[in-house]
């Protein structure tokens, strides 16, 4: 059983797989407490119905997409071994979006690590993250981005993404930064421009 906040078919809007049709599974529950969080209604897990994991899997299998994004909240608050195993057995790719602040469970085709300063990632996740996505709310966040980039593997893709409400202020700084530090790429929340969930 998992506290399911919502599940829906949409286009991935962020990071490496932006533009890919994907089935989203958003689990409730997060204690990281980002003040700019755009899904604060996910924080309290008790507000979201405990749903049989097999029912979630069935919905994903019925979706035309062969990719499932598990997000939150902080999905690693729960053991995701069964969810991933059955999705993989049905030839569905499993993509995780996590702050990395809880122990890893599940088998993942792609891990997007989005570290948060107030509750940093556990060390175990850095070497296996496929993608590092750092939210830029202020100029100080470039230092936080480099602190985390120093811990991931060479093959990890690096993204800076403006916090939505600060995108106009941060974008010029980000463009300059990425051009000076071309190991980084810019991620935009294109689903918000497309006005889709
Ligand atoms: Fe929101 Fe994600 Fe931060 Fe949790 S980790 S508070 S869900 S942005």
Image (cartoon, helix red, strand yellow):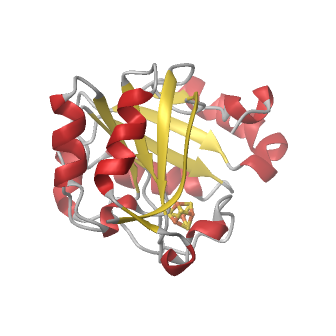
Visible residue check, residue 112: no
Indicate left or right for 187 with 163 as reference: left
31 w.r.t. 173: above or below: below
Q: Please name the residue shown 50% across and 69% down the image.
A: 49
The image shows residue 119 at horizontal and vertical percentages of 41, 73
165 w.r.t. 176: above or below: below
Query: Toward which corner of the image does residue 149 lie, by quadrant?
Result: top left
- Position of the C terminus, as image quadrant, is top right
The image shows residue 55 at horizontal and vertical percentages of 36, 49
- Position of the N terminus, as image quadrant, is bottom left
176 w.r.t. 114: above or below: above
Q: Please name the residue shown 53% across and 70% down the image.
A: 48
Closest to the observer: 88 or 50? 50
Indicate left or right for 25 with 57 as reference: right
Indicate left or right for 136 with 147 as reference: right
The image shows residue 19 at horizontal and vertical percentages of 57, 19
The residue positioned farthest toward the right in the image shown = 168
Q: Quadrant of ligand 1?
A: bottom right
> Total number of numbered labels?
0
Q: Please name the residue shown 40% across and 59% down the image.
A: 99
128 w.r.t. 193: above or below: below
Query: Toward which corner of the image does residue 160 lie, by quadrant?
Result: top right
The image shows residue 186 at horizontal and vertical percentages of 58, 29
Query: Toward which corner of the image does residue 77 lie, by quadrant?
Result: bottom left
Visible residue check, residue 73: yes
Q: Please name the residue shown 29% across and 66% down the image.
A: 78
């Amino acid at each position: 059983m998992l506290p399911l906040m919502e599940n829906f078919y949409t286009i991935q809007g962020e990071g490496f797989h932006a533009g890919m049709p994907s089935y989203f599974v958003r689990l409730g529950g997060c204690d990281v407490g980002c003040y700019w969080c755009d899904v604060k209604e996910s924080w309290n897990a008790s507000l979201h119905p405990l749903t049989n994991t097999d029912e979630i899997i069935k919905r994903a299998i019925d979706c035309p997409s062969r990719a499932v994004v598990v997000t939150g909240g902080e999905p690693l608050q729960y053991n995701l071994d069964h969810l991933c195993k059955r999705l993989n057995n049905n030839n569905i790719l499993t993509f995780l979006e996590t702050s990395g602040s809880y122990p890893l469970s599940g088998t993942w085709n792609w891990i997007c690590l989005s570290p948060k300063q107030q509750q940093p990632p556990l060390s175990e996740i850095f070497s296996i993250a496929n993608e590092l996505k750092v939210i830029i709310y202020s100029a100080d966040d470039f230092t936080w981005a480099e602190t985390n980039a120093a811990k991931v593997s060479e093959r990890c893709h690096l993204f800076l993404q403006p916090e939505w409400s600060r995108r106009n202020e941060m974008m010029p700084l980000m463009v300059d930064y990425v051009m000076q530090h071309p190991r980084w790429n810019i991620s935009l929340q294109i689903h918000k421009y497309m006005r889709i969930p």
